[in-house]
Amino acid sequence: MYNCKLCGGINSLIKDYNSNFIRCNICDAILKDNDNEEGNEFQKYFTTNEKTIEYMNTIEEDNTIPQKMPKSKTQNKKDSNPIETKINNKIEDFSKKMDLSDSIKTKVKELTKKVFDSKKIKVKLLESVIASVIFVVCRNEEEPKTMQEISTQLELDRRAVNRCYNSIRDIITENKNQIPQTVSRLINSYCDKILDNNNEKLKKLSCDISDNVCKYELIAGRNPTTIAAACILIGATLLKLNVSKKIISKKVGTTENTISNAVCVLKEYIDCIVPSEFTEELNLLNVI
């Protein structure tokens, strides 16, 4: 038995004495041996494990004997990656349910592949992984959807999706330098939902606060949605707008308790994050 240089198969070359051809039983490459003797001529083209194999430079043209046999349907099925096919099919299914654009769907596929390539998550969590990726991609594309909204549309357990998101957040979220831009985009989007008009002051103040929060990394590691919600609540309070924590929680899609915890941390550094012209209004934050 000899090795095949074409596919690297070990001891895969077999000589058919009836047709006087030598074939690889792995890649089906067919080579002709012009000598009936298996000595020097055979050794010229195929060698043992220790030597490099040399193939014949010329093969007699014969349409009935191809150099490489066509693959069977069974072989073609084996070549395709069943896991990758399953992932793509599930993304297509979810995209239809949520009416996602082609650009978002493409980015969901790319980011989902990145997650599974990392080998940090099991395929059995596929649905929760895709839901988490959809949450991040929609947020990055300025079409934010809440985790509750995504879970409801896809008929998934929100708590399971949240747990999955937390386990892969480092893989699918932006790097530290991109977070301020993401938070600013979210603030603009959420303010449009919270106030139909006259929201420019709230947008500007909330973005100014978030820029300082991110600059000093005061609540590093928090979800950008949480940071945006906390900054909006602080901004609305300083501007004396009728925007409650409950309203922000409903529009943003995070719990009131989550917003309260973030605000509680930020209040310790309030002098550093709020513009100086709002110094006199800082006592208003005692009620939130």
Image (tube, rainbow, N blue to C red):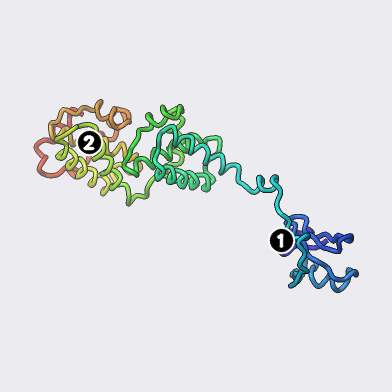
Question: Where residue 79 sits in the image (x, y, percent)?
Answer: 64, 49
Question: Where residue 251 sits in the image (x, y, percent)?
Answer: 28, 30
* Residue situated in front as seen by the camera: 241 or 6: 6
Q: Quadrant of residue 228?
A: top left
Q: State the CA–CA distance, disc 1 to disc 2.
A: 62 Å
| Disc assigned to residue 38 | none
Q: What residue sits right under mark 1 in the picture?
A: 8
Marks counted in the figure total 2
* Residue located at (74% from left, 60% from top): 66
Comes first in the chain, label 1 or label 2: 1
Q: What residue sits right under mark 2 in the picture?
A: 191
Label 1 crowd bin: few (<14), some (14–19), many (20+), radius 10 Å:
few
Tag 2 secondary structure? helix
Question: Where residue 44 sits in the image (x, y, percent)?
Answer: 81, 73
* Residue located at (37% from left, 50% from top): 175
Label 2 crowd bin: few (<14), some (14–19), many (20+), radius 10 Å:
many
Query: With 163 as the anchor, is 9 left or right in this view?
Result: right
Identify residue type, mark 2.
Answer: Cys
Label 1–label 2 contact, CB within 8 A: no
* Residue situated in front as seen by the camera: 139 or 206: 139
* Residue located at (78% from left, 58% from top): 12
Question: Where residue 236 sits in the image (x, y, percent)?
Answer: 17, 33
Assign the C terminus to one quadrant of the image. top left
Identify residue type, mark 1.
Answer: Gly
User: Which residue is farthest right?
Assistant: 37
Tag 1 secondary structure? loop
Residue 265 visible to an observer of this rendering: no
User: Which residue is farthest front?
Assistant: 63
